[in-house]
Amino acid sequence: MDADYVVVGAGSAGCVVASRLSESGDRVLLLEAGPTDSLMWIHIPAGMLKLLAHPVVNWNYSAEGPAGTGRAIHWPRGKTLGGSSSINGMLYVRGNPADFDGWAQMGCRGWSYDEVLPFFRKSEHYVQGGDPEYRGQGGPLKVEDYRTILPLTHRFIEAAQQAGYPFSPDLNGKQQEGVGYSQMTRRGKWRGSTAQTFLREAKGRPNLRVETEAQAAGLVFEGRRCVGVTYRQRGKMVTVRAAKEVILCGGAINSPHLLQVSGIGPADHLQSIGVPVVHELRGVGRNLQDHYVARISHRVRGTISTNQLARGVRLAGEVARFYLQGVGALTFGVTTAQVFCRSSPEKASPDLQLLFTPASYDNARFGVLEREGGMTVAVCPVRPDSRGTIMARSADPFEKAAIDPAYLSDPADERVLLAGMRFTREIFAAPAIAQHSVVETLPGPEVASDEALLAYARQMGTTIYHPVGTCRMGDGPSAVVDSRLRVHGIGGLRVIDASVMPTLTTGNTNAPTIMIAEKGAAMIREDARA
């Protein structure tokens, strides 16, 4: 089996890359370790809670005892067509212009905000239209404002303004800073994953072949050039050759892991696990960053939260509304409103994201809503200074990598998190939302000092599933790919996914990952023509 391009991983990036490369007539093979995206819960937005630990369409990784928390933390990642865009909360958040200008200043040529904005616009069809200077029309990815049906979200927006945060009519437009309604990727009432948008458009092309249940086991080299991929599919090992390039789109965990077990990475680590070194790149698996959050929850009175809509007669009514009208609680993904703000005035751009949900969660059961009404804000330092690692445990490509995100290992992250928790309490104290609060249930009003708040954050905080950075773009000894996403020192091999981000973006990472895939695919086609 041969192809011009072999794309490893049909996730948020891989579906985009495969779709765009197949537009030119080249033979494209797309490999996905998981099954097709036929599971019902994938396509119903509120089905996300059913997918957070699903045994079939989720890798179900675990960060084992990371620094700062001392406990294992569940890491969901999508293992199906669409990858994590098939199991996530569907939030569309591009990030802040300063994020990308910062990349350019770090030596990532061509990645400033002005240079990436056209690729954000190319990928999307913003249903509400928006400012054409910032928003796109006609792209495969349909983005729309959140279908807010619960008054609690409106009250939160009002309360944040009462607390001093300006209203932003479009958090992905001219002004990110302030408070605004969330935006989502969807197709009508259904989830809009990259499989159901980009890949859906491309599936009829005879030059695109998609193989599911095909888990990559290693890269094939001729000297210092990558010429193919070996993968396991339904118990059989298969090798495919790429006439032009192999593109890794496995994400921040699987891309560095595949490089390492194939002999590309820190030589001392590879030798310690019995992997012959093909090419030393010390940055592979390092520079791991993720968004760690501490939640503040309140018991609700005088209005309905999602908790009550998720049970009994009300749930039956919401199911009917969804199927008959395409509205209601089943259209919910996750966060309905957000605040982007600065932890201190000297910050040049927002370093905090406060994510509001008109719901609260049962601490004893992962991914389960409480029975009584509740509302929650997840406090997220969006530009953490803590850095962790993803490292292969052995030469076995099918053994999961060791994940150490090193949450809160840098004191600066603790300071930002504390500021965000106090800001959140100020918003909950504002009249518009305070009228609907019975009491703060997490961490509770008795948790008041900095020390107590940090202890709570370490004990109860969690990830919101945004790992990046483990195949960092740039120059120098710690970089893995160059500004055109080519692996340093190896021909015919690129990485195009969230792992190439040198730093985290200000907000959720699915939209910037799709942008990276759009730009990466365009660079591949440019280089092929050259």
Image (cartoon, rainbow, N blue to C red):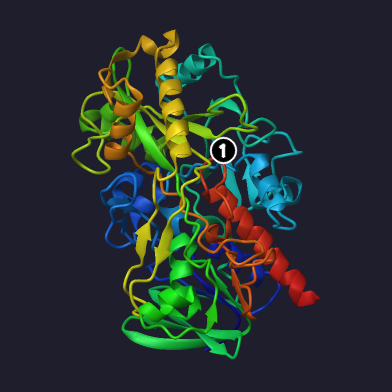
User: Where does the C terminus fall, quadrant-wise?
Assistant: bottom right
Left or right of residue 166, residue 450 in this image: left
* Residue at the extreme bottom of the image, as rendered: 222
Hey, what amino acid is under mark 1?
Answer: Glu
The percent coordinates of residue 328 (x first, y second) are: 39, 32
Total number of numbered labels? 1
* Residue at the extreme left of the image, as rendered: 364
Toward the viewer: 102 or 202?
A: 102
Depicted 112 relative to depicted 411: above or below: below
Depicted 14 relative to depicted 447: above or below: below
Depicted 81 relative to depicted 320: above or below: below
The percent coordinates of residue 273 (x first, y second) are: 35, 78
The percent coordinates of residue 420 (x first, y second) are: 45, 27
Q: How crowded is mark 1: few (under 14 residues within 10 Å), some or many (20 or more)?
A: many
Q: Can residue 326 be seen in this view?
A: no
The percent coordinates of residue 184 (x first, y second) are: 52, 40
Q: Can residue 322 be seen in this view?
A: yes
Toward the viewer: 447 or 182?
A: 447
Q: Which residue is drawn at 73% across and 71% down?
A: 525
- Residue 180, picture quadrant: top right
Left or right of residue 473, residue 73 in this image: left
- Residue 81, picture quadrant: bottom left
Q: Residue at x 31, y 73 (%)?
A: 399
Q: Which residue is drawn at 44% across and 17% down?
A: 427
- Tell me the SS state at disc 1: strand
Left or right of residue 372, residue 213 in this image: right
In the picture of the structure, the residue carrying the numbered disc 1 is: 144
